[in-house]
Image (tube, rainbow, N blue to C red):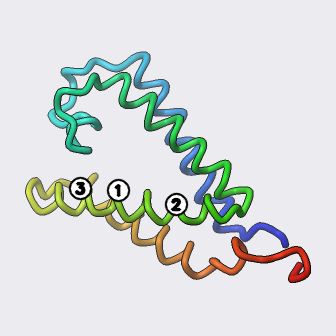
Amino acid sequence: MKRPLGVTLISCFYIIGALVLIFTAIFFNADADEFGIAYRFGLPNFPEQLFRVILAVASLILIYGYMGLKKWGFWLMIIYSFGFGLISYNLLSSHNQQPFIGNVSWSVIVLIYTFFVRKSFFLTEKDE
């Protein structure tokens, strides 16, 4: 089956995000942000640059499966979007800053769309 356009667009956004994470891991001043990404994920003592690289690599693996319409890519995207949305929602309720509103909105959009096109991930060879 042909990959849905939304899956391609979502994947491109995540690829760009992973590249930005890698870039900022190299050229990032850890003291510049009030809340680093590691802190946002509940790991305040974890090295920020290392966490960015780990998150970027995990995102690229996730996107490989998602773009390839793999079942595991579907489930990882559901888990990642739900988890990241929940973290952003928690931060939104305590800090009320625009990036967190955008992150929650994006997570909800990705969850709804991924659920909407779920059949693309679960086709068998005879269904195609």
Residue 74: x, y in percent?
59, 65
Q: Nearer the viewer, mark 1 or mark 3?
A: 1
Q: Residue at x 17, y 55 (%)?
A: 91
Horizontally, residue 121 falls left or right of residue 59, namely right
Residue 47: x, y in percent?
28, 22
Could you tell me the amino acid type at mark 2? Answer: Met
Q: Residue at x 25, y 56 (%)?
A: 87
Residue in the foreground of this view, choosing between 31 and 111: 111
Could you tell me the amino acid type at mark 3? Answer: Gln
Q: Nearer the viewer, mark 2 or mark 3?
A: 2
Horizontally, residue 83 falls left or right of residue 59, namely left
CA gap between label 2 and label 1 equals: 10 Å
Say which label, 1 or 3, has the lower sequence index. Answer: 1
Say which label, 2 or 1, has the lower sequence index. Answer: 2
The reply to whether discs 2 and 3 touch (Cβ–Cβ < 8 Å) is: no
Position of the N terminus by quadrant: bottom right
Instruction: Say what secondary structure mark 1 lies in.
Output: helix
Residue 100: x, y in percent?
25, 56
Residue 77 numbered tag: 2
Residue 98 numbered tag: 3
Q: Local crowd at mark 1 within 10 Å, few (<14), some, or many (≥20)? A: some
Instruction: Say what secondary structure mark 2 lies in.
Output: helix
Q: Which residue is mark 1?
A: 84
Position of the C terminus by quadrant: bottom right
Image height of 70 relative to 23, above or below: below
CA gap between label 1 and label 3 equals: 15 Å
Horizontally, residue 21 falls left or right of residue 48, namely right
Say which label, 2 or 3, has the lower sequence index. Answer: 2
